[in-house]
Image: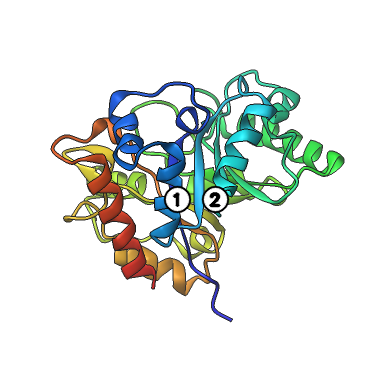
Amino acid sequence: MKPVARIGISLPFALLADQGCPPAVTALSDAYGGVDRLLDAIAGMGTSSVELRAVTAAASAETVDRAVRRCAGAGLTVTVHGTLRGGITEEDFLAPYRGFREPVTVTVHALTGCPASDTVHILQKIAAVCVRDGLPLCFAVENNRRKGTDDPGDSCEGALGIASQVPGAGVCWDMGHFYYNALNFCQNGNAIPEPAFLCAAVHTHIHGVDHGRTHFPPGNGRLPLAGYIEALQRAGYGGVYNFEPSIDRWEGVHPRDGVEETLALLREIVG
């Protein structure tokens, strides 16, 4: 049976938690008359999921739970962009997630400036606590763009190598980061990740590259989106096709227009 396609969008956790956001972000919610009406509108566009971006160890379980319930009020499930940092303990990392009772995908970047084994070690410890305590978290290691720093996750191979050593973990295919690397380091804008990476994908981040910067709407030649989605579909992907914008970077594009055009594009391609 063909997996049911789901469309999602990343929204700032701070916006959903009423903690204050940059003017460009609040312009998006203001365009709909507030956060709750924004969520209703997103659901009305055929979107079924919101990614909370990003949840740090400083967030309380109560605040995360309120954000989740706020999304649920519009009929939206959630995924989470989590945050690993050097020296974090498994208990500190998991504190914001203690209220989850339903399965949720949590995407993380590899730790930078240290070997991949450090990320593997902390994720293994976190996964073990989840099993012990019955926390229904599925971890996805995201491929990052190359930034000239020591980042063991700045390739699909690196992200997959980490995820394959963590029980129950998969990868998040960040299409924008992959395309950025393909253009700047492989000189092959038509590249597609290896089948092993695609088959391990449990989540996606979708955004376009514009003048060397990422997290823009993926239309207008900014991302070979149709080919990427086709590759995932061939691999049997069953996760969310998640648009991950950084609205404060956009110039000349109204946040509402960029969001609505992208969600319409995803509906058209995903089918």
Question: At which x and y percent is residue 223?
Answer: 25, 54
- Check contact, mark 2 vs mark 1: CB within 8 A: no
Q: In terms of depth relative to the viewer, which is nearer, 20 or 116?
A: 20
What residue sits 74% from the left and 36% below the top?
99
Q: In terms of depth relative to the viewer, which is nearer, 216 or 63?
A: 63
Left or right placement of residue 106 versus residue 270 in this view: right
The mark that comes first in sequence, 2 or 1, is 1
Q: Amino acid type of disc 2? A: Val
Question: At which x and y percent is residue 63?
Answer: 62, 28
Q: Residue furthest bottom?
A: 1
Residue 14 is at least partly visible in this image: yes
Left or right placement of residue 131 versus residue 252 in this view: right
In the drawing, what numbered circle is on residue 78?
A: none
In the drawing, what numbered circle is on residue 40?
A: 1
Give the class, few, some or many, for how many residues have Cα within 10 Å of label 2's Cα (few <14, many ≥20). Answer: many
Q: Amino acid type of disc 1? A: Asp
Question: At which x and y percent is residue 250?
Answer: 22, 36
Residue 193 is at least partly visible in this image: no
What residue sits 69% from the left and 29% below the top?
61
What residue sits 23% from the left and 56% below the top?
189
Left or right placement of residue 125 versus residue 12 in this view: right
71 vs 17: above or below: below
Question: At which x and y percent is residue 82?
Answer: 56, 34
